[in-house]
Amino acid sequence: MRVFCPASWPQVPGVDYSARISLGAILPATGQRAHAFFSRDGLPSGSVSHLIWQPPLSSWNGWSEQPSEIAHSYLLTARAGTASMADDHQYRYDFEVAACAPLLPALRAFAGDWALESVLDMTTVPPTSSLIWEEADGCGRAEIAGLTYLSARAPETYLELLVETVDGDMFGVLSTHLCPGWEEYYVGRRKLSQAERGAVERALDNAVRLADTCAPYLLD
């Protein structure tokens, strides 16, 4: 299932973001009208979409800077309304929150229909295809609530995965692919193919351990 991840969420009026923050005070509630900012005009207006909500530090800097916040992220079901240009670089989308569920349990509840991205090498005859994760570099990993978070870079691309190993099999529950041309976020539990698992395991073997760069600031 494809989901969308805003570039940023607005600050909630009346909340002091320089102090410790109650998660309940900033998390969008079911039935609430809300908005978020996207780097691209791609959220289908008028349709029901799924959005990843991240706590402030992760929303600004990414999970790789504060991996513990993966466990404090949520999956929103929202009906998108109007879209407008917020500035030269961002779009504002208004929507109604139909549901809000903790992200990690939600990821396991869906059956995944995604696959790891491939790239086509046109310099060979005939052209050959390979997994972009085979070109991963600068990898980082963190263990979060029984899952392994993996971030990496490939040529002009930023990659993320959440995987778990059960009875010798490796399953993915989230895949992120960000590059200058597009952004793709897919969720849902699926067993990785042998080729996919090999590429991911090599990335994991070369990954450094990630740690939170900021002291805990969420109260609940």
Image (tube, helix red, strand yellow):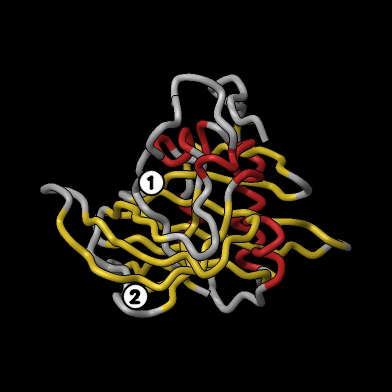
Asked which quadrant contains residue 213, the reply is: top right
Per the rendering, the mark at residue 127 is: 2
Residue 48 on image: x %, y %: 43, 77
Q: Is residue 131 visible?
A: no
Q: How many marks?
A: 2
Residue 46 on image: x %, y %: 32, 79
Quadrant in which the C terminus appears: top right
Q: Is residue 180 above or below residue 144?
A: below
Residue 53 on image: x %, y %: 49, 52
Per the rendering, the mark at residue 9 is: 1
Q: Is residue 71 left or right of residue 131?
A: right
Q: Which residue is drawn at the image coordinates 52% and 62% (left, top)?
A: 76
Residue 121 on image: x %, y %: 33, 67
Asked which quadrant contains residue 83, the reply is: bottom left
Q: Which residue is drawn at the image coordinates 76% and 46% (left, top)?
A: 145
Q: Which residue is drawn at the image coordinates 66% and 74% (left, top)?
A: 110
Per the rendering, the mark at residue 97 is: none
* 27 vs 151, nearest the viewer: 27
Q: Is residue 6 left or right of residue 123?
A: right
Nearest to the eye among marks 1 and 2: give it.
1
Q: Is residue 117 above or below residue 165?
A: below
Q: Name the amino acid type tagged 2.
A: Pro
Give the mark nearest the N terminus, 1 or 2.
1
* 105 vs 97, nearest the viewer: 97
- Alpha-carbon span between mark 1 and mark 2: 42 Å
